[in-house]
Amino acid sequence: MLLESIAFIIATTLMYSAPLIFTALGGVVSENAGVVNIGLEGMMTLGAFVGAAVGYFANDAWIGFLAAGAAGGALAFFHALACVTFLADHIVSGIAINFIGPGLSLFLSRYFFDGATQTLSLSLDAKIPRPLNGVFEQNGFFDMVFNQYATVYLALFLVAFLWFILYRTRLGLRIRAVGEHPKAADTLGINVLRIKYLAVITSGVLAGFGGAALSVAIVSRFSSTLVSGQGFIALAAMIFGKWKPVGTLAACLLFSSAQGLTVYLGRGDLQRMLPIPSQLLATIPFLLTLAVLIGFVGKSRPPAADGIPYEKE
Amino acid sequence: MSDEKRKLLAASPLFFTFFSVLTGLLVGALVLLISGYSPLKAYHVIIDGIFSRPSYIVYTVIYSTPLIMTGLSVAFAFRTGLFNIGAEGQFIMGALGAALAGAFLHLPPVLHAIVAALAGIAAAAVWGGIAGFLKARFGVNEVIATIMLNWTALYLNNFIVTLPSIKRTATNATAFILDSARIEILPLWKVSEAGRTWRAMHPFWHDIFRTPFNAGILVALFLAFFCWWILNRTTLGYELRAVGHNADCSEHTGINVKARMISSMAIAGGLAGAAGALHVLGWTRQAAELAAMEGLGFDGIAVALIGGTSPIGCIPAGLLFGALKYGGSKLQFALRAPIEVVNIVIGSIIFFVAMPKLLRIIRRWLEPKKRQGGDSHAA
């Protein structure tokens, strides 16, 4: 019983972490190149819609997943255009993205799905597969923990991949240089604008993946309240993770474990023994975030030139 | 137009705002065109939907009322160097506070409405103040703190409104506020026998009284001037702006920076709370369980930005947003066109507002080709 409970909590935690990890890593890429991306929420929402819609019409979640990345990247292009080329205030541009992304998603949803603000569901076998299904004894501990959607493994792999890119390759060094001291980077012959565009568009692609990891894996369709705030939580995870991939992963796992715990404590059998109102349980991730931010004050430092428009002289 | 005049126009921030609004509307038209709707018809529906009847105009004002106030909340914090993304949660707390005080206190009319509004404002001021305190005491970024507080407010609201002693039977909302707390204009008279007879003889007023016409807009206008006054005519406002401009410098001149941060966020919270409170007292009469954010607080960010983060600017910006929202809501019925085109328009407007360099390029384009003339003169 105890083992089963632990397995259940770990499993839900991992499941809910994937969308957060993709999106938060997007934030890591963008902000390490010096562009604040508060528009993650909007990009994630568009990704969730496009993933579900394309996935539905193509009857293939992977095609939807890729399309979601493309859509997120396209929206991020405009963020880059505003912030990098036209020296916009990054937060203001991000706010604009957060209106346009969900607005466009619902507009298109109504257009393609007969006026409805939710898409039709993917058939069960068209969803993102679970690669380790049937490897372990069914409903055993390992089966519960590791029988996850492929997006979960992809997200975890991406953490390592991004860490490698940022800290072990020349490109990563350039990205970080642009975020810390664009002028110095420019002097050394790095094409600052190109790096920034690359980073912001990549962040949109990842946020789009994050949205699709919700809409074609955890559930099987897009609805108007599906994302509602996850992009912002990913943003918080990135800050809590100190703008670094591994720290961000830890933060995402912490936040989604709060979500997992909420689901666990909200189960019928536990509700009878330990009646905690579900609405109060739902506040746990947010209060936990605040508590953690208070505890880690001063240690979390953004890249030095994060959010500062850079103009070549 | 003379070159002088043209230059003056191009230099004014108002021109830039007009340009952004126009471009935003064009983007909306383009989106409609691409998806096969006639933009002309669509904007015709929107404009008709706003102006063609007295009740439509009043509805536009009612839609704009909370937007002006949440806009003020964001603009006020902005002027003091803080970014209040928490207007959404503060709005929820304001609505909840007013709904509870309106339903469960027993006071004479007018006084009851004032007390209920103040209860909402106080609850929201505390909510905003928490973010200010976390920033002042622990250095927690207010953007992140207010995002977290928004969701906490949402679930706290859902918990409280569904408590058995508070909720109305068979609903997921609080008991209705008492009539003594309502700020609607003559809500009981207009449906009474005498009111109906009078309205039958006055078609103009008959139409207006179909709407939940209420005193909220007066409060919103008053608060806009109040914010302007605080920021520009009081020591507190001076200190708040100084802290926003340069916290270190302010510290050295003897301003209590931490206390000012907290008061700024508390005032911003109170303003968003007023929006929530008056929304309840003037229209909805209840605080309901929320499945998702209603967005009136987030819309306030748009209003503040379109209004140039000035309190007075929030009035036209709020009216514009309210008009687009109300007028746009008729698209679905009239053309079966998705109403979300309004969000795309608003987002595009903010997007253009965000780009100062674009303004410079336009200015250069609008200015007469003086540079060439100057060069030839020098040669």
Image (cartoon, coloured by chain):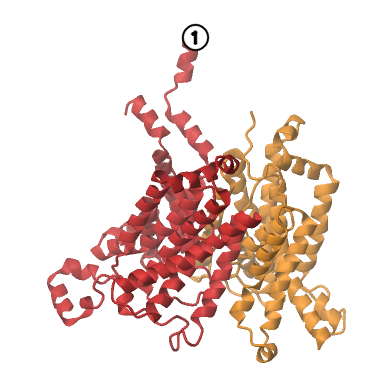
Chain colours: A orange, B red
Looking at the image, residue A309 sits to the left or right of residue A128; the answer is: left
Q: Residue at x 41, y 72 (%)?
A: B98
**Residue B289 in the image, given as x and y percentages of width and height:** 49, 77
Where, by quadrant of the figure, is residue B103 drawn? bottom left
**Could one spot residue B295 in this view of the protein?**
no
- Chain identifier of the residue bearing label 1 in the image: B
Establish if B147 lies above or below A83. Answer: below
Establish if A32 lies above or below B281. Answer: above
Looking at the image, residue A137 sits to the left or right of residue B20; the answer is: right
Q: Residue at x 78, y 83 (%)?
A: A5
Establish if A76 lies above or below B177. Answer: above
In this view, the residue farthest toward the left is B201
Q: Residue at x 74, y 63 (%)?
A: A251
Q: Nearer the viewer, residue A183 or B280?
A: B280
Q: Nearer the viewer, residue A113 or A46?
A: A46
**Residue B252 in the image, given as x and y percentages of width and height:** 58, 40
Find disc 1 in the rendering and name its residue: B378
Q: Nearer the viewer, residue A162 or B91?
A: B91
Where, by quadrant of the figure, is residue A223 drawn? bottom right
Disc 1 marks a residue whose amino acid type is: Ala
**Residue A97 in the image, given as x and y percentages of width and height:** 56, 54
In this view, the residue farthest toward the right is A136
Q: Mark 1 packing: few (<14 Cα in 10 Å), some, or many (20+)?
A: few
Element type at mark 1: helix
**Could one spot residue B232 in this view of the protein?**
yes
Looking at the image, residue B86 sits to the left or right of residue B4; the answer is: right
Q: Nearer the viewer, residue A77 or A261?
A: A261
